[in-house]
Amino acid sequence: MKKVEAVIKPFKLEEVKDALSDIGIEGMTVTEVKGFGRQKGHTEIYRGSEYTVDFLPKIKIELIVTDAQSDAAVGAILKSAKTGKIGDGKIFVSTIEETIRIRTEEKGEKAI
């Protein structure tokens, strides 16, 4: 099993959700986060004063998939979240040792 974490631009969430749904992935956790990378934030002017916005709003998507679904999930996220501009985000894939559904105590891929 794999854990796929993606940090994307907020306005791309619906497109990513639809793309994952199209390949059969229904469950995910979505969190509103703030951060920066190479983008380094930006400056804004508010009531005549300039200030720096260091942390930009992003969306973090987390999903657990089977090994077989991993490449398709990453591909769907890449295709649907990409704008070609700086700040598109990142995808992280890591191995999951165990998954347990609390309600039924199912383990492994059955619990996904």
Image (cartoon, rainbow, N blue to C red):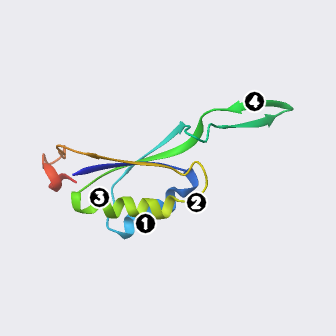
Name the amino acid, label 3.
Ser
Q: Is residue 85 left or right of residue 102?
A: right
Name the amino acid, label 2.
Thr
Q: Secondary structure at mark 1?
A: helix
Q: Earlier in the sequence, mark 1 or mark 4?
A: 1
Instruction: Report, in whole angstroms, how far the alpha carbon at label 4 lies from the one at label 3.
Output: 41 Å
Q: Which image quadrant: the C terminus? A: bottom left
Q: Secondary structure at mark 2?
A: loop
Foreground of the two, 22 or 50: 50
Which residue has dot 2 on it? 83
Residue 19, label in figure:
1
Q: Position of residue 90 (x, y in %)?
A: 46, 48
Q: Secondary structure at mark 3?
A: helix
Instruction: Report, in whole angstroms, how far the alpha carbon at label 1 lies from the one at label 2.
Output: 15 Å
Q: Earlier in the sequence, mark 4 or mark 3?
A: 4
Mark 3 vs mark 1, foreground winner is: 3
Q: Earlier in the sequence, mark 4 or mark 2?
A: 4
Instruction: Report, in whole angstroms, how far the alpha carbon at label 4 lies from the one at label 2.
Output: 26 Å
Q: Residue at x 73, y 36 (%)?
A: 43
Instruction: Report, in whole angstroms, how far the alpha carbon at label 1 lies from the one at label 4.
Output: 37 Å
Instruction: Report, in whole angstroms, how far the alpha carbon at label 3 lies from the one at label 2.
Output: 22 Å
Foreground of the two, 72 or 63: 72
Name the amino acid, label 4.
Tyr
Name the amino acid, label 1.
Ala
Residue farthest toward the front in the current orientation of the protein: 38
Q: Secondary structure at mark 4?
A: strand
Which residue has dot 4 on it? 51
Which residue has dot 3 on it? 70
Q: Quadrant of residue 102?
A: top left
Q: Position of residue 44 (x, y in %)?
A: 76, 37
